[in-house]
Image (cartoon, helix red, strand yellow):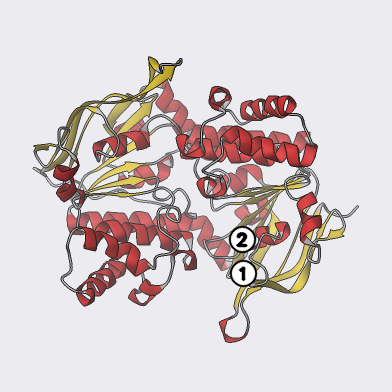
Amino acid sequence: MAPLLEINDLSVSFGEGESEVRAVIGASMSIERGETVALVGESGSGKSVTALSVMKLLPYPVARHPGGSILFDGEELIDKAEGEMRVIRGNRVAMIFQEPLNSLNPLHSIEKQIREVLEVHKRLSPAAAKARVEELLDLVGMSEAKSRLHAMPHEFSGGQQQRIMIAMALANEPELLIADEPTTALDVTVQAQVLKLLKELTQKMNMGLFLITHDLGIVRRMADRVNVMTEGRIVEQGSTDAVFDNPQHDYTRHLLAAEPKGHPDPVAEGAREVMSAEDVRVWFPIKRGVIRRTVGHIKAVDGITLSIREGHTLGIVGESGSGKSTLGRALLRLDSSTGGIAFQGHDIQSFGWKEMRPLRRQMQIVFQDPFGSMSPRMSVFQVIEEGLLVHGLGQSYEDRRRLVAEVLGEVGLDAETMDRYPHEFSGGQRQRICVARALVLRPKLMVLDEPTSALDMSVQAQIVDLLRELQVAHKLAYLFISHDLKVVRALAHDLIVIKDGRVVEAGTADAVFDKPEKDYTKALMKAAFQLEADESGVVAV
């Protein structure tokens, strides 16, 4: 019996002649029904291009296939017309994309977007489609969203957006599901739930799962077979146990050895306090009725107190929707809040927009989604220069070019790339650009909101090393928000664990990681380090 998906000697090129970029070179692999096959490799290795080739979603004719074959259930996809592919996409083959906010329509409610897939392929009535939407949201652990079907994508957290994408992909019970980094935006407990769900669906529906990820822990837990890709070539493939236990290729050994390690440098004694907050609250009113009367509040942040010093990293962890990002925005006065917020000794809670503007230079934020936080119409130079122009730094164009070149060098990028555009860089490089955009203003405080979640393991380790070096060089204070506890451990001096807007546990990072006291913290640790616990019987941190 033929495999569900069979890729033979596939090549993908962008452009022609001297400008040709060979993204995939002679790749071959297969997936059987009911089987999970992983494709792993560093950012820019060609993983996503391979997956997009299966769906025929590459920017043709700029992209082309110099050779190779893609057979789905015995049918050749390479030469299929667009009309024929539309019948297959979303129905027989579905895809979960890496960056959910870029894939969801910002103008349509989540109900409309999930329902659309059902109406196009299944011709369901509005009532039947709505019932199926609610069933799918239950399936991906978002039963609370059934009361928010008319909400827009931006009203949900990053993890919730990813679950909405998974619900859309599963709507028509596809034969093949392509999951391109499906859990990068998810916190550890939801990640465990989603992976369990995907595993169960693969077995229950006899569905093939094509898993693209940089998280080797997920690969070991989920995949039956694994393919390792670098520079467009598959350099090693085999059963997951064989590849992990006895890797043959140097690149595979490099991947297995790469993960964030070490601890931050100790904070200097007497380090000056950069920011403090006391009893901070962010409550969003729930309004109902004709006159829109307030009947309650969503308590996104509910009475949090903290302090951050020079050269100090305060880690904020918790599940998706727990209030981590809202807290970060409130401290920067980007969201309205109550309670005391002091920055470098000044009470800024009462400051208006004009009073805050001079301080904006000293408090910067690096967002979770590097591609979504940069204008695709601006070059890297323009992206970084924008802050210099707003704050009147750099007397001339040449001065600003020099400042941008210097900061690009600090984050490990070639200054000659400053005139390129964001889409021309890998995910790791884009995140370095976002760090450079914040760093060029020489801030005192940086809020890092999931800055490594979309990056492969080796690039995560590079970004962690970079952030530690920059912290020491510039005495930076970091508020580090993340669901990746391994990265938090490598960066944070102190830790706050948040659930439903409240602090569940707080203390030094070592104390909270080594001896968590609260059940919720223990559950987070167990979910994050489940692989180690599964193999040894002890949760290793």
Quarter of the figure with residue 295: top left
Residue at 36% across, 43% down: 488
Image spot of residue 203 (x, y percent): 76, 36
Instruction: Give, as a three-letter code, the residue at label 2.
Output: Lys
Q: Does the CB distance between marks 2 and 1 fall below 8 Å?
A: no
Quarter of the figure with residue 247: bottom right
Instruction: Work out which residue is located at the far bottom of the displayed protein and give it.
Output: 18
Label 2 residue SS:
helix
Q: In this orientation, which residue lies closer to the viewer: 400 or 205?
A: 400
Q: Earlier in the sequence, mark 2 or mark 1?
A: 2
Residue that label 1 marks: 232
Q: Is residue 132 left or right of residue 499?
A: right
Q: In this orientation, which residue lies closer to the viewer: 536 or 382?
A: 382
Q: Is residue 416 left or right of residue 239?
A: left
Please give the label number shown on residue 315: none
Q: Above or below — where is 276 with respect to 30?
A: above
Q: Is residue 170 visible?
A: yes
**Number of numbered discs on residues:** 2
Instruction: Give, as a three-letter code, the residue at label 1.
Output: Gly
Image spot of residue 271 (x, y percent): 11, 44
Q: In this orientation, which residue lies closer to the viewer: 147 or 241?
A: 147
Residue at 61% across, 60% down: 47
Q: Is residue 537 visible?
A: no
Residue that label 2 marks: 47
Image spot of residue 362 (x, y percent): 18, 51
Label 1 residue SS:
loop
The 10 Å Cα crowd at callout 1, few under 14, some 14 to 19, many 20 or more, is many
